[in-house]
Amino acid sequence: MTRVVLALLIAGLLAAPAAAQETRERLDNGFTILVRENPIAPVVAVSLLVKMGTRWEDSTNAGISNFVHAVMVRGTARRSGSELAEAIAGLGGKLSAKGDVDDSEISATALARFWRELLGFTAELALEPKLSPGEVDGERDWLVGRIQKRRDNAPARAFDEFYAALYGAHPYAIPGLGTPESLARIDHAALVAWYRRFYQPERMTLAVSGQVSAAAVRAEARRLFGALPRGAPVTEPARSVPGNSGERRVFEQPAQQTQILVGALAPPLGHPDGAAVKVLSTALGGGMAGRLFVELRDKRGLAYTAAAYYDPVVDPGAIVLYLGTAPENATKAEEALLREVERVRQDLVGADELDRAKGYLLGRYAMDRRTNERRAWYLAFYEIEGVGADYPERYRRAVEAVTPSDVLRVARQYLGTLTTVVLRPR
Amino acid sequence: MSASVTPVARAALGLAAILLLAGCATAGAMRPAATATPTREVLPNGVVLIVQEQRASEVVALQLWMRMGGRDEAAEELGLAHYIEHMLFKGTPTRPPGSIDTLIEGFGGTSNAFTSYDTTHYDFVVPTRHLRAGVELLADLAVNASFPPEEIESEKKVVFEEMNLIEDDPEKFLLRRLYEVAYSPHPYGRALLGRREFIQKLDRDQLRQFYRKHFVPKNMVLVVVGAAAPAQVRQLVEAAFGRIQAAAPSRGETPPVPTLGPARRVDVSRAEKQAYLGLAWRTAPLANEDVYAVDLLTSILGDSPTSRLNQTVREQLRLVATIEAGYGAFEKAGLVTVTARLEPADLDRAEAAILDVIRKVRADGVTEAERQRALITAESSYAFDIETAEGLAKTYGQAETTWTLDNELAYLSRLRGITAAQIQAVARKYFGDEDYARVRFVPGAPSR
């Protein structure tokens, strides 16, 4: 029966693809539901975002948001972790949970015909995790292994050192996985308390995208999440202002490549300068026609990886220029990178270059919002960060309006003090 | 741009066809029949064109697949196919170096390219309004690449860096070494990026000669999937690719693949603090009937957290941090690999445990529940592949160049016909206690 209804609905959508807008509903307990119907493939994706992440952590409990999710997936009140994994596999699906910077996510996908079961498992994991004391040590060991692996990986280590140098005492300096020392301090009671503090309906947003009926999904989500009582408000910790000290730090470890990261603090999500800084980072190092790639890799062969990016977050973000290069080229490559920074702070970018950067930026943005998994995440992310469902459209207009003098202004404003991390082979 | 090592046989359009016939559900039932399957045609000069309309979003995926890859290199010219992959984007007589990337990126599109053993492919995704420009660009690259000498030189450093990058990534490098140990001297054991000494001396004539020899219409497969009417696509492609002059393709024979055994075991000292273990068994090539059962067996062994290797070796015995199985099914041979990250002290026990898991499948077979789950996994994998135009295009290009499009279209239905007994039979046929290759990465002073 459901299938017949769905068939009619999808036929309608095919006739008018522009009508495929998301529907949004806030329940009485503060829980938010977003659904987007997408007929293209027989799949469904779910993203449940919770306002919990390194932004609320400090050096003593670094990594706890991610740690609690690692223990959550080890089992619920109703089934063990392997039973859960087996059940999800039976839906042709995946389910994972992790802590990030400003939020944590339970992410799940399945064949669309199993959407109801998938929502059920997502709710079970979010609301009834077992958080068994017996799982804590094993997961800690596993996470410490991942931290070790990350430290062995030169690019990953370089990025972690860079964020630590750039953000100083602000929690964005904390690596998402934490440190072996912080994880050793986090016990079962701390994990349970962390879970209870943040898993409150008003801190949660559920987004669903796929070959589903929005009305049916919303009804089921209401049933699953509607009875959850509101919780105590979370007191926000006092956060240090990020302190870009302008340091240059050098590290060594066994590797073939030298990693060079240069960057600075940038505007937070939703800031009026955001679009211009995005265009700036794209002109510098977005894609194979960005200045770093053209000048350092194409013309001079000084680096293999040459990129720049800016990802807005709730507190000040970072604009990062990144090179991966052979050790013998490292000094020249770093000098050339700094010359590109100087150039973009002195001269206006050309009209063609600006058009290329905007086309690339908006094209990539559109391309990134095509799979259901990404669509669900974007929906939930814009909602939970309070920028609104029309953000993509506002962002597109803001990018199109950026002028060469806007780029020059933000380059001068944000690229004045640079923090540098160099990781070279030992 | 990168070299991919393991195309995996799976995921076919068979699914949509089944649903369509059954009339019971989701995608197939709702799609207008005309857009649910690709059309394939051969232009008079031999270029194959595969087209499918897909209105997921206002973009179109354009992929040029070449029946040419690392296996077509002579033993003394390793790395040519991959080097050409890099050089193709460097310009043509009418497009100066750098302008191609600028053009595609200015469209808001993406470009990429991949070299494998059997094939090489060049991919664009562009907004539909730039369809014509995209088709014309691909055709230009296919026959008019100019290989500017200064670009050839500067790209060498880039390729050397790419080599470093793979060596620095233990998981990628493990697979690379495992293929080498399992196949050498067969071409599937070669480093697709080539050898430094050869690349260092590589000149323009060598590149042009290889390009001229292999970039002929009969080696070309153009796949176009996206928000564009097939009739319009056909017209554009005929105009751009139809005029390429026909020439006879020449593809040499590959030598037989070696048998595996205890002689093919290598330990490598590496800087990482954790160890890595890779085992490989020789299995069926793409055109072999066993490919379906081997695909399901690989999935049951190590394709997910619920797989046997994960449940036994990671969950119960806690001997590895991660473990997975993969099936690299190529035109001339197939290899099933099992790779794990673990503590160095557990290397021997983990290997014994993996062999035990396989022994148990040989002795007792797999359960109906496992078979069903492997089928669902394959169905799902396909369903997620076709979410994007480029994902669907890739399944077609891969099939047309290394197998056949019909085999791809029937794949899921063939998979459904495989019984648990057939899965056990391929476990017995291919997975012995001794006939595997092994590579171990152990912490220590790097032995390079």
Image: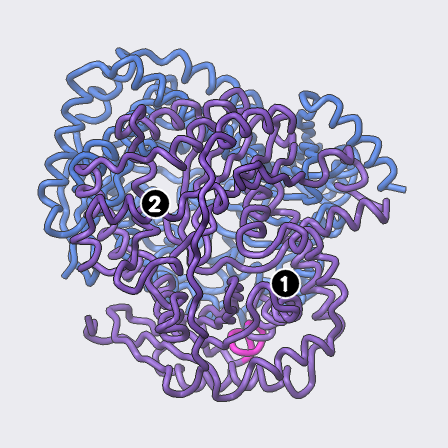
Can residue B306 be seen?
no
Image coordinates for residue A203, horizontal then vertical, percent: 57, 38
Q: Which residue shows up at 48% across the image and 71% down it? A: B337
Look at the image and give the residue range highlighted in magenta.
B310-316
Residue B3 or B85: which is nearer the viewer? B85
Where, by quadrant of the figure, is residue A220 drawn? top right
Towards the viewer: B370 or A160: B370
Furthest residue toward right: A1
Q: Residue at x 9, y 44 (%)?
A: A331
User: Element type at marker 1?
Assistant: helix
Looking at the rendered structure, the kind of residue marked 1 is Ala
The quadrant of the image that shows the C terminus of chain B is bottom left
Image depth: mark 2 or mark 1 in front: 2
Asked whether B177 falls inside the magenta stretch, the response is no
Amino acid type at circle 2 is: Tyr
Q: Mark 2 and mark 1, same subunit?
A: no
Chain label for disc 1? A
The label shown at residue A85 is 1
The chain whose colour is purple is B
- SS of the residue at dot 2? helix
Mark 1 crowd level (few <14, some 14–19, many ≥20, 10 Å Cα): many
The subunit letter for the residue under badge 2 reads B
User: The chain drawn blue is chain what?
Assistant: A
The residue under the point 20% across, 20% down is A412
Position of the N terminus of chain B by quadrant: top left
Q: Looking at the image, which is closer to me, B232 or A342?
A: B232
Residue at the spot 35% in from the left edge and 59% down from the top edge: A182
Residue B44 placement: quadrant: top right
User: Which of the labelled discs sits on residue B211, or is there none?
Assistant: 2
